[in-house]
Image (cartoon, rainbow, N blue to C red):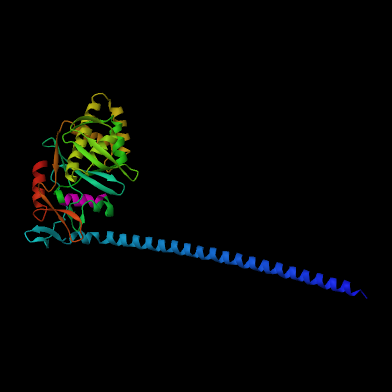
Amino acid sequence: MQPKTNSRAWNLLTCILFAAVFAGLAFVHAAWQQGMAAQDERIAMLVDEIGSVAQENFSLSEQISSQEMVLQTLEGDISASSSKVKRTADGPVILAEEIDLTAPEDDGTFDIMILGTNGAHTDTIIVASVNDAEEKITLFSIPRDLYINGRRINEYYYYYGVDQLERMVEVVTGIEIDRYAKVDLTGFTEVVDLLGGIDVYVDKAIYDGYYPNGKGGYDAFSIEEGSYHMSGTEALKYARSRKSTSDFDRAARQQKILAALRNKLFQLDSIMDLKTMTGLFETGLSTIETNASIFDLLGYYYDYQDYSFATGFVLSTSNYLHSIINESGAYILLPKTGNFEEIHGVIEGMVN
């Protein structure tokens, strides 16, 4: 029989060991619970993320379905009459008059729609109308805020693409569009620099303190009256500046830039052979989206280089349009007569 002191010591040691084991188990259990809680939290976050992705996919699917529905019903929409707004002595009123959206017949001219784009948006719409019988080219501009069939005209490009914009331009002008050329901001500067710059006469001084600098801010742009040799960047600023002028002034400047580009091409033609000129056109064509081929463009250039070139006509509030704030609070432009028939007659007289 062991002594009592040894038995008590053994019992004490056993208790200590059991306490240590239980403490260890408790710690492990607590750690396991914390781990499970963290795991549950991660699982919950993952479920939320999956749910968000699913919701985004669902929203995207709905947007695509909605867009497809819009495209499917567009033909019906554009054949329906659109609401007109016209200023009277008593204020703006809604007119029920219909605008004829039938595509015009070929009038014997060859017409090119030129678009200046910035991503998915276009704020430059110019038509170049070529009359072979008269050997002349006429440029005229359509303002982006012109309202037709329930939308600003430039919105047709954003929502439906170049084909539907082309159709609306035909409705406004009364002439059939044969080709289009679309140039974005980067492509424009590259084309001008490719030609070695262009010569432009500035007939009116400009100071624009809010010209976008491409970095989310603004820089000041100013230019005095006089003759300038402009790089691509300088020509773009001159063509786009509008804070201190109007969209109508800007449209006129854009036509001047096109005329300067044409003149520079003629200058280069006198010192370049056909192979070099073809290479120049191919390089320029890489920055432009068009439904004309390189052979078409070369043909236009050599066929039309001796034609007279008329610029300066811009549809505006100083001639055949008036401005109004519509019921949605948006600034829009409308034909003063309530339809485009008068404008058709004016344009026909210019191009023919």
Q: Residue at x 34, y 61 (%)?
A: 63
Picture coordinates of residue 186 (x, y %)? Answer: 32, 40
Residue 112 quadrant: top left
Q: Nearer the viewer, residue 247 or 269?
A: 247
Which residue is at the far front?
Answer: 5
Residue 235 versus residue 42 in the image, above or below: above
Q: Is residue 288 visible?
A: no
- The image position of residue 26, as x and y in percent, is 68, 69
For the point 29% across and 45% down, which residue is it?
A: 118
Q: Which residues are magenta?
A: 162-171
Query: Closest to the observer: 283 or 19?
Result: 19
Question: For residue 43, which quarter of the picture?
Answer: bottom right
* Image position of 23 with respect to 279: above or below: below
Q: Is residue 193 left or right of residue 148?
A: right
Report whether residue 266 is seen: yes
Indicate left or right for 200 with 92 as reference: right
Q: Is residue 346 left or right of residue 284?
A: left
Magenta stretch, main secondary structure, is helix
Residue 217 highlighted magenta (yes or no): no
Total number of numbered discs in the rendering: 0
Residue farthest toward the top in the current orientation of the protein: 271
212 over 329 or under it: above or below: above
| Residue at 85% from the left image edge and 73% from the top image edge | 8
